Amino acid sequence: MAHEVHDVAVKLAREAGELIVTRRAGHIEVASTKSSDVDVVTAVDKESEEFLYTRLRELRPGDGFLGEEGQVEESTTGVTWVVDPIDGTVNFLYNIPHYAVSIAAVTGDPSPVSWQVEAGAVFNPATGELFHAARGEGAFLGERRLQIGPPPPMNLALLATGFAYSTAMRKEQVRILSQLIGEVRDIRRMGTASLDFAAVAAGRVDVYFERTLSPWDHAAGELLVTEAGGIITGIRDLAQGREGIFAGHPTLVTQLKARISEVGGDTLLQDVPGWGLE
Ligand code: 2AM
Ligand code: CA
């Protein structure tokens, strides 16, 4: 099963990737905004999602679908496709070559609390890099197998993170980072969650932490990390998800999680005043 859906994920990530990079050669403008003025959608996000939805209906009739731009289909087979048709939309808008199509096949209820990720593909069409994994079969960049190495001490760790679209939440995140910046090698904010997970799997950063992500931002990325020998966990004793997600070597994740808790970075979202997103 993992193998079958893996091949579909890879094929469609490439196809949708080719579509969005071709569209990027033309004029791109913001079509609408979502949670806030800076949370943008272009016509290409919608086109890419529509394309993936249609292709999956052809290739995998009966499977469910959960896409960022609103397509939802219940599964009758037990498999659901969790899809971000363009992850890193702001990078896409500015033509920064760091955006991706992220596709995962999950079984069980398609929610991070309960899903099992069977396969995932994260394709950056601007660089041609394809990260992919099937459950139990390893994570790969192209043909190269990925394995997370021994963890550096925290003061030599490169930490990746991202900011929410809500202003109140961003201010809170900067407050936390102002504590951590003196305690790690450096911080990266690259703007594309799925590629942050891929970077952890590929050893390009040591550890990653972010809050307020949605299921399509991390479904495929999770499997890249766990198949490369890392762990995925949430804040406090919660499952990974909207409240928070950590990815990396188990030792480093445990240390970072404890430190973030010490500086108050695990306050529940509902308790961050005016955090502003539903
Ligand atoms: P997007 O480009 O598909 O919107 C930026 O930190 C990364 O997190 C991007 O991958 C972005 O996905 C994703 N993201 C989506 N919603 C977010 C939110 N509410 N807060 C933080 N990051 C979000
Ligand atoms: Ca998106």
Image: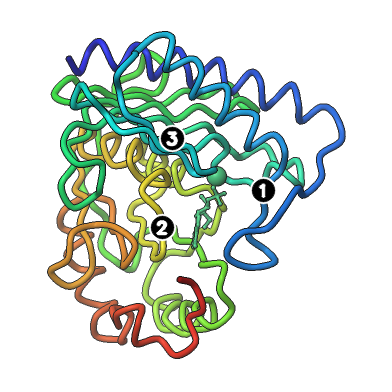
Badge 1: how crowded within 10 Å, few (<14), some, or many (20+)?
some
Residue 224 lies left or right of residue 45; in this view the side is left
Mark 1 C-beta closer than 8 Å to ligand 2: yes
Badge 2: how crowded within 10 Å, few (<14), some, or many (20+)?
some
Asked whether the residues under the numbered discs 3 and 2 touch, taking CB atoms below 8 Å apart as contact, a structural biologist would say no
Nearest to N terminus: mark 3 or mark 2: 3
Nearest to N terminus: mark 1 or mark 3: 1
Q: Which residue is mark 1?
A: 41
Ligand 2 image-quadrant field: top right
Q: Which residue is mark 3?
A: 83
Badge 3: how crowded within 10 Å, few (<14), some, or many (20+)?
many
Q: Residue 97: which numbered mark, if any?
A: none
Mark 2 C-beta closer than 8 Å to ligand 1: yes
| Residue at 56 percent of width and 15 percent of height | 15
Q: Residue 213: which numbered mark, if any?
A: 2
Q: Quarter holding the C terminus? A: bottom left
